[in-house]
């Protein structure tokens, strides 16, 4: 469904009230302050339009006293991507919300960084949002329960460990996702019932992207086999996140115990492999190294090989000398 914002109507107001209620539930669970400054990431798709209309309605009714602005990054991946940017800007203006639109060449970024277009686009989007958000502002994305389930399944298919099956966190730093408890279909139905316009990105139907096949084929099959599968996957992800947080705390204590005053990590009497991987991932930080590079670092440290340097990706490297590891 495409087009501009529709004039208010009884049906439109009812749908916007329901969208506002969904957003408010998530905001309360995340303890977003009533006077928070929010930067909404809006692509023009159904989920982000639900986010924008829900936030606008909460402000209109006085239920929330947020300061809200909208941000849209045009990835330049389609000839008509500028139409999406114009649509978002017009919709935000109709709701009297400030909107910042910027364009970047994600294909060129992916080529320069040696990454997939999907990964490069995500990184570019979060850099853009972080650069726009004022001090103390929260960046709000419109990820839903379906997005979280898709992420868990994709990471399982990639052979991820526990950290990968945590799904999408509801909060990470200044980024909050108050719609994670909502289903995508429910939000879209509310938009349709209220005649609220949104854009459909044709790339979301491209079977060349793994996420699209998980979304269009795997999840419907799982829901057919076991109704409520998305909700159950979400519950699994939350439990995994709790376990992962505990293991991170254990790893942080182990890293502190092993780190020398000069910053080197003492790897004499190495910990169990599972804990060792987590300690080194924590020491390396973001971006995380590939599993192959991490295993190479572990092998070098535990093999007591001197003068070994392991490339960690980008400009980072680890050196191993006499079971002492330095990350630089």
Image (tube, helix red, strand yellow):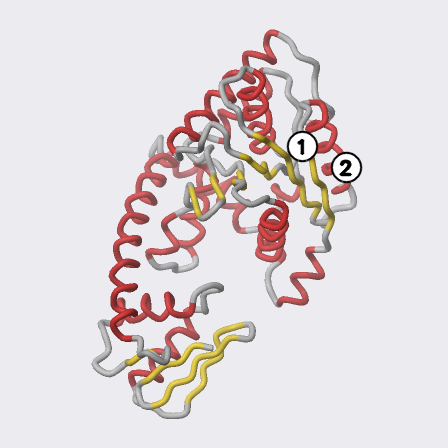
State whether residue 12 is above or below residue 184. Answer: above
State whether residue 229 is above or below residue 172. Answer: above
Q: Which of 69 and 209 is in front in this view?
A: 69
Q: In this view, does 211 lie to the left or right of 8?
A: left
Point out residue 314 in the picture as x, y percentages from the top left corner. Answer: 55, 72
SS for callout 1: loop
Residue pictured at 35% horizontal, 31% vertical:
228
Q: Which residue matches tag 2?
A: 83
Residue pictured at 54% horizontal, 41% vertical:
137
Other residues around mark 2 within 10 Å, as few (<14) / some (14–19) / many (≥20): some
Quadrant of the rendering where the N terminus is positioned: top right
- First-in-chain label (2 vs 1): 2
Contact (CB < 8 A) between labels 2 and 1? yes
**Can you tell which mark lies on residue 245?**
none
Residue pictured at 33% horizontal, 34% vertical:
226
Point out residue 308 in the picture as x, y percentages from the top left corner. Answer: 42, 88
SS for callout 2: helix
Q: Which residue matches tag 1?
A: 199
Considering every residue shown, the one lying at the far bottom of the view is 306
State whether residue 298 is above or below residue 179. Answer: below
Q: Quadrant of residue 6?
A: top right
Mark 2 and mark 1: Cα distance apart in space: 9 Å
Q: Is residue 265 left or right of residue 193?
A: left
Point out residue 128 in the picture as x, y percentages from the top left corner. Answer: 63, 50
Q: Is residue 170 left or right of residue 39?
A: left
Other residues around mark 1 within 10 Å, as few (<14) / some (14–19) / many (≥20): some
């Amino acid at each position: 469904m495409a087009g501009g914002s529709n004039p208010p109507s009884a049906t439109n107001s009812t749908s916007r009230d329901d969208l506002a209620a969904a957003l408010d539930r998530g905001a309360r669970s995340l303890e977003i302050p009533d006077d928070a400054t929010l930067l909404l990431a809006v692509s023009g798709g159904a989920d982000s339009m639900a986010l924008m209309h829900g936030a606008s309605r909460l402000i209109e009714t006085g239920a929330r006293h947020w300061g809200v602005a909208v941000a849209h990054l045009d990835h330049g991946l389609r000839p008509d991507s500028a139409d999406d940017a114009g649509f978002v800007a017009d919709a935000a203006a109709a709701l009297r919300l400030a909107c910042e639109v910027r364009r970047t060449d994600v294909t060129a970024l992916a080529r320069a960084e040696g990454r997939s277009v999907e990964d490069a686009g995500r990184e570019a989007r979060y850099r853009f949002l972080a650069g726009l958000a004022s001090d103390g502002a929260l960046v709000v994305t419109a990820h839903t329960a379906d997005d979280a389930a898709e992420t868990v399944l994709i990471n399982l298919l990639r052979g991820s460990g526990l950290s990968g099956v945590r799904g999408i966190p509801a909060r990470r730093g200044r980024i909050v996702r108050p719609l994670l408890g909502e289903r995508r279909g429910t939000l879209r139905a509310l938009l349709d019932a209220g005649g609220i316009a949104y854009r459909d990105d044709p790339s979301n139907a491209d079977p060349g992207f793994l996420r699209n096949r998980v979304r269009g084929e795997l999840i419907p099959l799982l829901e057919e086999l076991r109704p409520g599968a998305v909700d159950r996957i979400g519950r699994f992800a939350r439990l995994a996140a709790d376990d992962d947080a505990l293991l991170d705390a254990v790893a942080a204590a182990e890293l502190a115990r092993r780190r020398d005053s000069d910053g080197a990590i003492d790897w004499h009497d190495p910990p169990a492999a599972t804990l060792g991987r987590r300690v080194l991932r924590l020491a390396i930080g973001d971006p995380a190294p590939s599993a192959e590079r991490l295993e190479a670092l572990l092998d070098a440290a535990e093999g007591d090989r001197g003068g070994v340097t392991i490339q960690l990706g980008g400009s980072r490297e680890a050196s191993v000398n006499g079971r002492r590891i330095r990350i630089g």
